[in-house]
């Protein structure tokens, strides 16, 4: 594996910026949905006895989880863009080795080579 060419780096940077825009848009939409649920929960609506669907509390919990997931993804994209700016994008932050292009295509915000990613996953499972 070798370092990315400047053309590849620009392509990944463009892809990351586009992904960032999409994630920020979705995060804003989710925040709006959470605000709506918050208003409904704080109001006088009593959905705890509605057998037809999720309660406002359940919906709040679901949306909060999804919102956090998008916020985490957005943070990873921002970190990847920062690595582009400082010249370390495409290199594993753990070992310093070049990350395979195929991995970057699949996970453009990744900071780990496939071996380190597998090791981290195995450590989490313990």
Image (tube, rainbow, N blue to C red):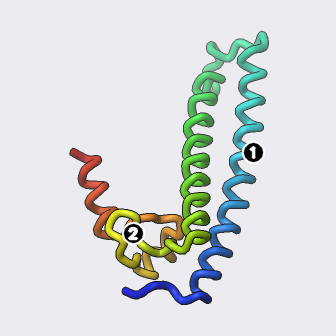
* The quarter of the displayed image where residue 23 is located: bottom right
Q: Position of residue 64 (x, y in %)?
A: 60, 34
The residue lying toward the viewer, choosing from 60 and 124, is 124
Q: Select label 2 or label 1 by which is in front.
A: 2
Which mark identifies residue 92? 2
The residue lying toward the viewer, choosing from 105 and 47, is 105
Mark 2 closeness class: few <14, some 14–19, many ≥20 residues within 10 Å: many
Quadrant containing the C terminus in the rendered view: top left
Q: Position of residue 79 (x, y in %)?
A: 56, 59
Q: Is residue 55 left or right of residue 102?
A: right
Please tell me which residue is depicted at 70% across the width and 42% down the height of the picture.
Answer: 30
Position of residue 125 relative to residue 91, above or below, is above
Please tell me which residue is depicted at 59% across the width and 87% down the height of the picture.
Answer: 6
Which element carries disc 2, helix, strand or loop?
Answer: loop
Mark 1 closeness class: few <14, some 14–19, many ≥20 residues within 10 Å: few
Q: Is residue 1 left or right of residue 104?
A: left
The reply to whether discs 2 and 1 touch (Cβ–Cβ < 8 Å) is: no
Q: Position of residue 109 (x, y in %)?
A: 53, 65
The residue lying toward the viewer, choosing from 16 and 125, is 16
Please tell me which residue is depicted at 57% across the width and 69% down the height of the picture.
Answer: 86
Which element carries disc 1, helix, strand or loop?
Answer: helix
Position of residue 93 relative to residue 74, above or below, is below
Which mark identifies residue 59? none
The residue lying toward the viewer, choosing from 15 and 55, is 15
Quadrant containing the N terminus in the rendered view: bottom left
Which mark identifies residue 29? 1
Q: Position of residue 87 (x, y in %)?
A: 54, 74
Label 2 to label 1: alpha-carbon separation: 33 Å
Earlier residue among tags 2 and 1: 1
């Amino acid at each position: 594996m070798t370092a990315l060419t400047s053309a590849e780096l620009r392509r990944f940077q463009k892809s990351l910026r586009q992904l960032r825009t999409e994630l920020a848009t979705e995060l804003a939409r989710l925040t709006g949905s959470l605000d709506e649920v918050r208003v409904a929960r704080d109001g006088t609506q009593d959905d705890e006895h509605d057998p037809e669907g999720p309660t406002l509390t359940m919906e709040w919990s679901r949306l909060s989880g999804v919102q956090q997931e998008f916020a985490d993804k957005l943070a990873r994209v921002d970190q990847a863009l920062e690595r582009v700016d400082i010249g370390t994008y495409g290199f594993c932050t753990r070992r310093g080795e070049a990350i395979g292009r195929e991995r970057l295509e699949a996970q453009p915000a990744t900071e780990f080579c496939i071996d380190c990613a597998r090791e981290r996953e195995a450590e989490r499972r313990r």
